[in-house]
Image (cartoon, rainbow, N blue to C red):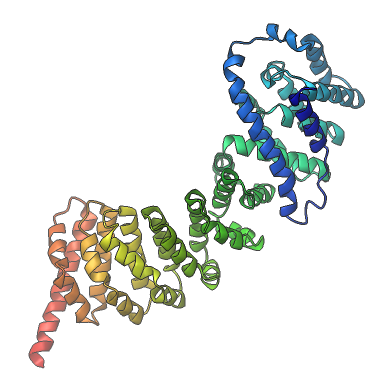
């Protein structure tokens, strides 16, 4: 008995294994899913090793496998016309052939088996037909590009997703395996991108069908699956209305655990999710702060201390700073803001992404914080840094810095702050920007100088009076 034969017999047994209490817990889906995933990955590797041989092979050479392809073609034709009981018998026969066959999967594709089975899954109401058709698809799908094209052409993904609500747990399990297969091979992020962006507004009704799949990936031990799962959750949490679903599933502790993973790839894949949550409603921001997100970000930064991590940390902080006065107070009091300032000054002063988020943080504090928050921010050396950051070609950064100067001067309550801008040549730089080719920058620069002159005149007047 060949190893391939033994493997396929083992596969058949595993495919018949029922998943119990599927709805009760995501974790109970993981075991079956990843058994299939690992097996499919193994098949994919084996298939790639065989591809050079397959390219020079045609159906005429397959007689070595002792399979009557004319008979198989007739069986496939019979599927289109026979009654349910006859169709089921034919599918069971085909299933046995596929499971024990040494014949590579491309031959079954050429015979039109995949298209026929997808059509049966779509139209049949017989659970046994659906279940066994899925068994065949799972077994022959070894990651071939032709197979994926056939799935796309037959709109198979939508068919599988619709069947997720089927009331037969065993069929649900098969569909779940099928979805995992597609997303492992095609990259789960592309699937979600298509599902959410092909129509506007996006169809969020599919979220219940896919959210458990992504969460299961995140809870796995396989790096590629974890990353795919994180990207899936990222696309879901882009919509404020869906953030609650992730939090209700208690995925936050798992995400924080991954944030401290030894793999930087995994850590970076978690940041976009946290960014989406921090960009959500005030209660989402408060959830993060209540769960010590600032401490977690600080630990992660100290662990890696690179520009990508600092960029994401700065992004999350800038989102949180667009919150309530109490939330801004927590950010000002944390060590993270000081770390960001120090690293821009000493190490990452040329990284525009970090500088841009830093200017957004300062703007949000100026617009949403108290005067005490602003004073505390200034004491951290922000003015000197803004006078450095504004010297760039990035027009968005320049405009943000000008807005900071404009707001500070308009406060007109603390001449010390205005004097700080003058001390670090801020107004000299602003004067140079009055001739900038961008009219928004030039106009705002002129307004700043006008307000500065008014402020300066008032200061001189007060000095004379005293």
Above or below: residue 462 compared with residue 341: below
Q: Residue furthest right?
A: 85
Examine the rendered structure and indicate whether residue 133 appears above or below residue 360: above
Of residue 198 and residue 1, the one placed in the foreground of this image is: 1
From where the camera sits, is residue 406 visible? Answer: no
- The one nearer the camera, 385 or 428, is 385
User: Relative to 164, is 84 on the left or the right?
Assistant: right
User: Residue at image x 13%, y 83%?
Assistant: 459
284 or 184: nearer the viewer: 184
- Using the image, determine if residue 329 lies above or below residue 306: below
Q: Identify the residue at horizontal 26%, vertical 73% (top origin).
A: 408
- Where residue 461 appears, as percent x and y from the top left, is 10, 86
Q: Nearer the viewer, residue 49 or 163?
A: 49
Where residue 318 appears, as percent x and y from the top left, is: 40, 64
Q: Residue furthest bottom?
A: 466
Which quadrant of the figure has residue 253?
bottom right
Quadrant that contains the N terminus: top right
Residue 297 lies, in percent from the top left, at: 46, 64
């Amino acid at each position: 008995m060949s190893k391939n034969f033994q493997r396929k017999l083992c596969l058949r047994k595993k495919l018949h294994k029922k998943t119990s209490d599927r709805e009760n817990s995501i974790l109970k889906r993981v075991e079956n899913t990843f058994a299939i995933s690992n097996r499919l990955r193994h098949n994919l590797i084996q298939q790639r090793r065989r591809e050079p041989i397959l390219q020079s092979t045609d159906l005429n050479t397959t007689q070595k496998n002792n399979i009557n392809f004319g008979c198989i073609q007739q069986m496939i034709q019979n599927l289109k016309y026979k009654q349910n009981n006859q169709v089921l018998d034919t599918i069971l026969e085909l299933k046995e052939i596929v499971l024990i066959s040494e014949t590579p999967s491309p031959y079954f594709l050429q015979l039109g088996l995949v298209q026929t089975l997808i059509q049966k899954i779509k139209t049949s109401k017989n659970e046994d037909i659906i279940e066994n058709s899925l068994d065949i698809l799972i077994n022959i799908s070894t990651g071939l590009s032709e197979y994926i094209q056939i799935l796309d052409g037959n709109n198979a993904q939508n068919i599988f997703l619709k069947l997720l609500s089927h009331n037969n747990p065993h069929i649900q399990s098969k569909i779940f395996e099928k979805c995992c297969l597609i997303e492992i091979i095609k990259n789960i992020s592309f699937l979600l991108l298509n599902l959410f962006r092909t129509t506007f507004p996006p169809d969020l009704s599919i979220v219940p069908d896919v959210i458990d799949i992504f969460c299961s990936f995140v809870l796995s031990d396989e790096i590629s699956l974890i990353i795919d799962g994180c990207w899936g959750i990222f696309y879901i949490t882009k919509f404020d209305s869906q953030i609650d679903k992730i939090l209700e599933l208690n995925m936050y502790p798992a995400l924080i655990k991954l944030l401290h993973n030894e793999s930087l790839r995994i850590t970076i894949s978690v940041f976009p999710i946290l960014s989406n949550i921090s960009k959500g409603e005030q209660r989402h921001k408060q959830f993060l702060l209540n769960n010590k997100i600032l401490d977690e970000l600080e630990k992660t930064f100290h662990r890696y201390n690179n520009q990508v991590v600092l960029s994401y940390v700065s992004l999350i902080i800038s989102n949180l700073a667009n919150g309530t006065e109490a939330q801004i107070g927590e950010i000002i009091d944390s060590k993270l803001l000081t770390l960001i300032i120090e690293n821009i000054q000493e190490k990452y002063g040329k990284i525009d992404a970090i500088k841009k988020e830093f200017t957004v943080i300062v703007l949000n504090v100026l617009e949403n914080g108290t005067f005490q928050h602003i004073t505390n921010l200034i004491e951290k050396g922000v003015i000197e840094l803004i006078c450095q950051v504004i010297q760039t070609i990035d027009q968005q950064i320049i405009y943000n810095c000008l807005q900071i100067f404009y707001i500070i001067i308009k406060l007109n309550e603390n001449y010390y702050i205005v004097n700080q801008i003058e001390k670090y040549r801020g107004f000299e730089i602003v004067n140079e920007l009055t001739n900038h080719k961008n009219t928004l920058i030039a106009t705002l620069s002129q307004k700043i100088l006008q307000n500065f002159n008014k402020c300066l005149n008032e200061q001189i007047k007060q000095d004379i009076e005293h």
